[in-house]
Amino acid sequence: MFVYPVDDWQYDQPAVLTSQVQSVREDMKLLAYEDVLRDLTLDEVEMKLLSAGNGQEMATFLAHYETEDGKALTSRTCVFTKEDKFVKVRATFDARAPALDEVESFTQALSEQISVPSESLFMARLRKQWRAAKL
């Protein structure tokens, strides 16, 4: 699990989550380009409502690939926003493992219970600069 700041002043907008998920997918494509991940295939991104009932969404997708030593793996990645942070959960299993759906259930439960650090002074100042530049 990773928790990191949203790099946008409008961190509550759905497009920010979509952009972040695309960035995660591009990172995986870069690893494939560098031959760290072989035969990478990325399933389509699915947007699902978080069970917390606040109307927020979670983005999730599967990635299938082989490692440098030929081991076939599948990863499920789930990303959602909590306050001004992204929360990303990624679990990787043997390609035949049935546990991948459990990652989504775990992420749903996590979204209800996790607390994230408050906005840092650094990010508040940075977002203020971004907001002023956009207006």
Image (cartoon, rainbow, N blue to C red):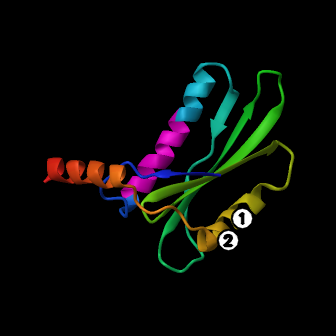
Was residue 76 drawn as part of the magenta stretch in this picture? no
Report the residue that reaches farthest toward the bottom: 53
Q: Amino acid at mark 1?
A: Phe
Q: Quadrant of the C terminus?
A: bottom left
Q: Position of residue 96 (x, y in %)?
A: 86, 45
Q: Position of residue 20 (x, y in %)?
A: 46, 47
Tell which of 126 and 100 is nearer to you: 126
| Residue 13 appears left or right of 48 | left
Q: Position of residue 49 (x, y in %)?
A: 54, 71
Q: Secondary structure at mark 2?
A: helix
Was residue 19 drawn as part of the magenta stretch in this picture? yes
Judging by the rendered image, the residue that carries numbered circle 2 is 109
* Main SS category, magenta section: helix
Judging by the rendered image, the residue that carries numbered circle 1 is 106
Number of other residues with Cα within 10 Å of mark 2, as a class: few under 14, some 14 to 19, many 20 or more? some
Tell which of 7 and 41 is nearer to you: 7
Residue, x 40% and y 60% (percent of image)? Answer: 119
**Which disc, if any, is residue 24?**
none
Give the Cα distance between marks 2 and 1: 5 Å
The span picked out in magenta is 15-26
Q: Amino acid at mark 2?
A: Ala
Tell which of 32 and 5 is nearer to you: 5
Rendered position, 73 above or below 107: above
**Marks 1 and 2: in contact by CB < 8 Å?**
yes
Tell which of 40 and 117 is nearer to you: 117
